[in-house]
Image (tube, helix red, strand yellow):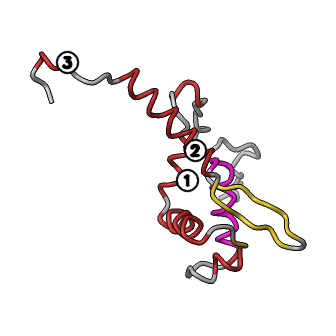
């Protein structure tokens, strides 16, 4: 019996396992989803509370109050910064972070305005609460 030739059935080009995500722009969604995603993580909520109560701090001062390493805290701060929650300042060798109060207020006011336009309060005569 002649030997059987074994061929490689794997092609050199592979299809992606999952299709690429379809991303929506902020204008399509109607509000800033990054803002809400930033608040969805409990560690980021703790960071926001720390900055709210203690003011401007550097990464080491923030990470001393959390169980996460500085590198993890740094990534969370980057997410919060990109979402408009915090501002950063370079002070000598360190970067300090503080809440961007005016930015947060602006985003919340924009959301409130959109909700008022989308979902007006019920008429007093309709009997709905």
Label located before the other in sequence (3 or 2): 2
Mark 3 nearby-residue class (10 Å; few <14, some 14–19, many ≥20): few
Q: Regarding mark 3 in the picture, which secondary structure is present there?
A: loop
The stretch of residues the image draws in magenta is 71-84
Quadrant containing the C terminus is top left
Asked if the residue under mark 1 is in contact with the one under mark 2, i.e. CB atoms within 8 Å, the reply is yes
Please give the name of the residue rendered at 61% of the width and 29% of the height, measured from the top-left corner: 25
Closer-to-camera residue (20/46): 46
Residue 121 occupies which quadrant of the picture? top left
The residue that label 3 is drawn on is: 123
The residue that label 2 is drawn on is: 34
Mark 1 nearby-residue class (10 Å; few <14, some 14–19, many ≥20): many
Q: Nearer the viewer, mark 3 or mark 2?
A: 3
Q: Regarding mark 2 in the picture, which secondary structure is present there?
A: helix
- Horizontal placement of 21 versus 114: left or right? right
Total number of numbered discs in the rendering: 3
Closer-to-camera residue (12/124): 124
In reply to whether residue 77 is colored magenta, the answer given is yes
Q: CA distance from mark 2 to mark 1?
A: 6 Å
The residue that label 1 is drawn on is: 38
Q: CA distance from mark 1 to mark 3?
A: 35 Å
Quadrant containing the N terminus is bottom right
């Amino acid at each position: 019996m002649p030997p059987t030739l074994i061929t490689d059935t794997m092609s050199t080009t592979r299809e992606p396992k999952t299709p690429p995500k379809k991303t929506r722009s902020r204008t399509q969604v109607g509000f800033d989803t990054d803002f809400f995603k930033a608040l969805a993580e409990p560690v980021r909520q703790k960071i926001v509370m720390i900055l709210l109560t203690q003011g401007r701090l550097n990464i080491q001062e923030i990470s001393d109050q959390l169980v996460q390493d500085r590198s993890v805290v740094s990534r969370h701060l980057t997410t919060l910064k990109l979402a408009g929650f915090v501002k950063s300042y370079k002070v000598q060798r360190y970067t300090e972070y503080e809440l961007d109060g005016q930015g947060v207020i602006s985003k919340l006011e924009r959301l409130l305005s959109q909700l008022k336009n989308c979902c007006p309060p019920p008429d007093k005569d309709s009997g709905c609460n």
